[in-house]
Amino acid sequence: MLSKPPHSPPRLSRPGADSHVAFRRRGSCGEDGAAGSAAARLAGGPGGGRGGGPPSLDATEAALSSIRAAPAESSAPAPHEPLASAPWRHAFSTLVSHRAFVSDGFGEVVFKLEEHWEFAVGAFTMEDVARDVTLLPPQFVASGMRHQGGVYNQPFAAGFSFADVDTRMDSATVVMLNAGFLVPKLASISLAMLEATGLPIWLNVYLSKPGLATSTQLHTDAQDVVLVQCTGRKRWRVYRPPPPGKTPSLDPFARGKGTDHMEFVEEDLLIDTVMEPGQVLYIPAGYPHTTDTLLEPVEDEVASQPSVHLTVGVDSHIWSLSYAHLRQHALTRAGQPAALSDGAPVSALPSAAQRLFWEPPPPPHPS
C-alpha cells in the first residue's frame, strides 16, 4: 500500500501569514513551500536546504529521477501477443516503493526518470489502436473541442471506426478513456499498478499525430499519474500549482476545463521536456500541464510516428481517499459545515497545507 510516513493531522483553521511555516514540507511546490522560486531553481539558484535543513528540491528531483525501476533484462512484446506483465509489475512496484518516492515524491514533485523502460517501447502502437479502439464504447473515445468559449471532450458517435479516429487525429489528440479496463492488452498494466499501490487505478491512452501546436490545453487533473511513452514524441510543460486561495470557488484538481482558462506563468515552469519512447514522467495531481507535438525536425524513424503514450493514474481523490475527504464526510455526518473555522472553504488554505490535506491516509495495517 502506497502511503507516506505518519505526520500530524492538518489544522482545521486558516493560518495567518506568519504561521505558514507550520505547513512547509520537503518537495512541496506551493507558493510558500520549499520550491518557492521555480525561476531561481531553473536558473540553477538555491532551492532550499541550507545548513542542516531538509534537502533542496534539486537534490530531491535528482534522487527521484535516478530511481532504477526497470528489470535488468526485458524485451518488447511481440506484435499482437498478450503484454507480459512481469516487467511492468517489477517497474511499478520498485518505483512506488522507493524510499525517495514515498517520502518526497508522491503528490509532491514532478520528475522524469533518467532510465528508459525498454519493455515499454512499442508496447502499444497505432496497430494496436486500430485493432482495439472499437472495443471501447463511443463515449470513452474522445478529443478536445472548443465550444462557446470553453474546452470540452467531444466523444465519437455510435458505430465509429478506426478510420474516424485517424481522421480526427489530423487536428486533435484522441484519448481512449479507461482503456485499461476494456482492452485486454492493457489490463495487465493496470493490474500491475493496482497491486503496486493498493489504490484505485485507471489507464488512458493518448494519440497525437506530429505537428499539433496544442495537443492538450493547460489544465490540472485529479490523479497522480505515471506517463509512459510508447511511440513517437511529445513535448510536456508542467507548472507549479497556482495559489488555490486566489480562486477558492474553483476545484484545484479540475482547472483549465470548460470555461475556466488557465494563464501561463513562465516563472512557475517546473519542467519542459520532450518524451521519447520508453521514457517515464511523473506528475502529481493538481499540477498544471500542457502538451504539443510541434517539435524541432529530427530525421529518424520516431519522427514520423504518431505519439502514443499511456497515462496510468492513481485515483485516490476520485474515490475520496484523503484526509480532506475524511474530514468532510465526518463533519457532514455530524451535521456540521465542512468549511474552515472562519467559514472559508478548504481551498483557501495555503498550497503547502492543501498538499498535506489531500494526501491519502496511511492504511490501517501497513503491508
Image: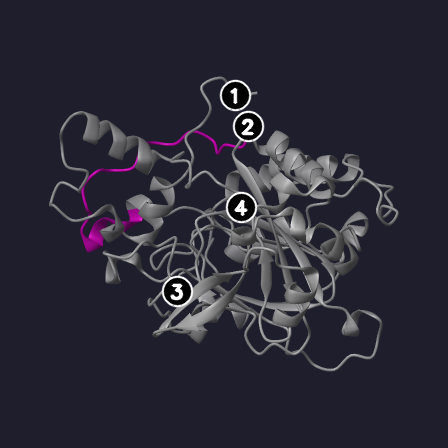
Kindly identify the amino acid type of the residue bearing the numbered disc 4.
Answer: Gly
Query: N-terminal of the two: label 4 or label 3?
Result: 4
Q: Amino acid at mark 2?
A: Met
Q: Is residue 115 at least partly visible in the picture?
A: no
Helix or strand or loop: what does disc 1 sit on? loop
Q: Nearer the viewer, residue 287 or 15?
A: 287
Front: mark 1 or 3: 3
Q: Nearer the viewer, residue 304 or 323?
A: 304
- Amino acid type, label 3: Gly
**Residue 338 visible to the viewer:** yes
Q: Nearer the viewer, mark 3 or mark 2?
A: 3
Q: Nearer the viewer, residue 235 or 18?
A: 235
Q: Secondary structure at mark 3?
A: loop
- Residue density around tag 1, few if under 14, some if 14–19, many if 20 or more, within 10 Å: few
Query: How crowded is the residue under tag 4: few (<14 C-alpha within 10 Å), some, or many (20+)?
Result: many
Residue at 47 percent of width and 62 percent of height: 153
Kindly give the residue lying farthest to the top in the view shown: 365
Q: CA distance from mark 1 to mark 2?
A: 7 Å
| Tag 1–tag 2 contact (CB < 8 Å) | yes
Please give the label number shown on residue 366. 1
**Residue 12 on the magenta segment:** yes
- Residues shaded magenta: 1-21
Q: Residue at x 59, y 75 (%)?
A: 171
292 vs 114, left or right, is left
Q: Which residue is mark 3?
A: 256
Q: Position of residue 175 (x, y in %)?
A: 58, 58
Work out whether residue 305 or residue 155 is closer to the camera in this orientation and state it.
155
**How far is mark 4 from mark 3, CA to CA?**
24 Å
Mark 4, residue position: 105
Q: Give the vertical position of 5 relative to 114 (above or below).
A: above
